[in-house]
Amino acid sequence: MIIRWLGHSAFQIITNHNLKILIDPFISNNPISPVMVEELSTDLIMVTHGHKDHFGDTMEIANRTGAAIIANHENSVYLSKQGFDSLGMNMGGTVEFQDIEVTMVDSSHSSDMDFMDEMGAGGSSCGYIIRLENGRKIYHSGDTGIFGDMKTVIRDIYHPDIALLPIGDRFTMGPREAAIAADWIKPEILIPMHYNTFPVIQQNPLEFAERVEALNASIKVVILEPGEFYEE
Ligand code: NI
Ligand code: MN
């Protein structure tokens, strides 16, 4: 299985059964994207919320590849009206897609569809727990501030093995909060995201890794450059 960072909160996951997943495919306007949007193939796109730095190129990619889309109910209704195969869901629910399971979990953020000329109401932003065919669980938090259910619901119920958390600050948790969130969630592997895309979310991921190590040395922080991947 590989988890490839495409910059910002965009990730490509390719499972051992060669199922291809894209999360928050913000590619064409992403200044640190290592790929062209036309290069990406996928079976499934997952969107955490309607902000343009997450919703991104969802429609272009789905249009070209025929990929299914998982999104919150409100974004899903919008996508369905545009003619896309969208699997709408809401907090706490789980859907199966081929041999994986996806559970939608809370995030502490907003979600209006800001890519429209007149901003559309986009429901609630979310995170996802992805349970792979081999039992490994990946948590993509979406944009979020720290919230107490990371310690209870996310950790106690879902036990993610791999967590993808924002560290950019300003619009999400910063390194201080994300390190505490990491200790609450206790994943084996932690990959930071949503930083160094723009000057306002500039962060040093090495300093973040030191903060995590100081709180919980059993968590391995994997710092990726855009285009690099974690493999297991
Ligand atoms: Ni956002
Ligand atoms: Mn964002």
Image (tube, grey):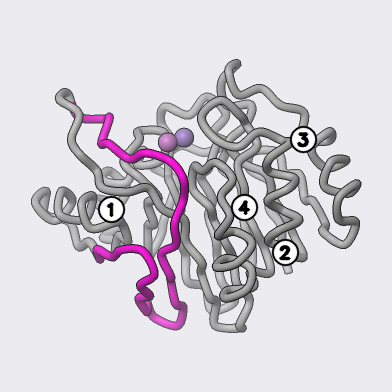
| Residue 16, image x, y percentages | 59, 76
Is the residue marked by circle 2 packed among few (<14), some (14-19), or many (20+) residues within 10 Å? Answer: many
Helix, strand or loop at label 1? It is: helix
Q: Quick check: is the Cβ at mark 2 less than 8 Å away from ligand 2?
A: no
Left or right, 59 with reference to 176: left
Residue underneath mark 1: 62
Task: Return the disc, 4 or 1, that comes first in the chain's sequence.
Answer: 1
User: In the picture, residue 155 is in which quadrant?
Assistant: bottom right
Of the residues under marks 3 and 1, which one precedes in the sequence?
1
* Residue bearing the label numbered 2: 187
Which residue shows up at 59% across the image and 45% down it? 146
Magenta-colored span = 87-116
Question: Could you say which is closer to the camera, residue 45 or residue 37?
Answer: 45
Residue 190 falls in image quadrant? bottom right
Q: Is mark 1 within 8 Å of ligand 2?
A: no
Q: Earlier in the sequence, mark 3 or mark 4?
A: 4
Q: Amino acid at mark 1?
A: Ala
